[in-house]
Image (cartoon, rainbow, N blue to C red):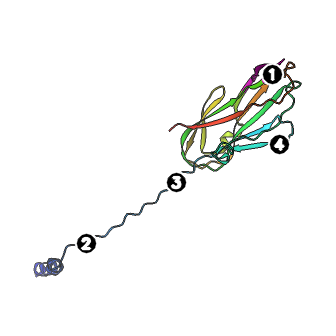
Amino acid sequence: MKKVLFILFLTFLIMPLAFADSPVEVHRITIKATVLPVKPIFQLGFTSGMLDPDSMTVVTAKEQGTDQESTRPPIVFVPDIKLNDLNLLFTARLANEAKCYGNYTLTFEAGNFEVQRNGVSGVLSPSSQDLKVSEDFMSRGGVETELIQANSMQISFNGSRCTAGELATFEVVYLADSELDPATYYTDISLEVSSNF
């Protein structure tokens, strides 16, 4: 009797499937959500050594535009190099809360002054250059330093959220030259950032 009841029960379960008009239909939509990385924004600041201490200057590459007029760097006056040694300090900063993976190389370049001595063209080169990792670098969080050379450093982002702040300082010294002719002289200090992907 139990067998008969069991067979009848299975029959009632299977019968609707046998008489169904079509097989089961599946309608599927795939949802895709992309979480984009927050790429780092770097800045170069002229921290100390300028003629007017209130003329601290910070430059972000993207803010300088792409045409020739807008890419001119800001000009900051320094003391008379005929009479004074120039001890200039520049700071590389992370300007945002980057959250990404990847390696970057930060390279600092200190240019030569194109000068005149007794009417003869020449250059006044830096007497020293010194690159140092900022003391609070580890507090940035998601970035680590890998290699430091004379004027460049490699940094690596590990995917954690960073905090904005200093990455490195670059100190440049130009010694006074009493032979310089009276004129206005220029040179550029630059920070080049390249990605190593």
Is 26 situated left or right of 148 in this image? left
Spatial separation of the CA atoms under disc 3 and disc 2: 35 Å
Circle nearer the N terminus (3, 2):
2
Q: Which mark is first along the chain, 3 or 4?
A: 3
Magenta stretch, overall SS: strand
State the residue in front, 190 or 178.
178
Residue under numbered circle 2: 25
Amino acid type, label 2: Glu
Quote the CA–CA distance across marks 1 and 2: 86 Å
Given residues 155 and 111, the one toward you in this image is 111
Specify the quadrant that holds the N terminus: bottom left
Viewer-side residue, 101 vs 48: 48
| Secondary element type, mark 4 | loop
Disc nearest the viewer among 1 and 2 = 1
Q: Nearer the viewer, residue 97 or 17?
A: 97
Q: Amino acid at mark 4?
A: Ser
Q: Quadrant of residue 83?
A: top right
> Which residues fall within the magenta stretch?
115-129
As drawn, the label of residue 55 is 4
Residue at x 60% of width, y 38% of height = 144
- Relative to 23, does residue 185 appear above or below in the rendering? above
Q: CA distance from mark 3 to mark 1?
A: 52 Å
Q: Which residue sits at x=16%, y=81%?
A: 12
Mark 4 touches mark 2? (CB < 8 Å): no
Question: Which label sits on residue 116?
Answer: 1
Q: Amino acid at mark 1?
A: Gln
Q: Reading the chain from its start, which is encountered first: label 4 or label 2?
A: 2
The structure residue drawn at horizontal position 75% and vertical position 25%, both measured from the top left corner, is 114
Q: Which mark is residue 155?
A: none
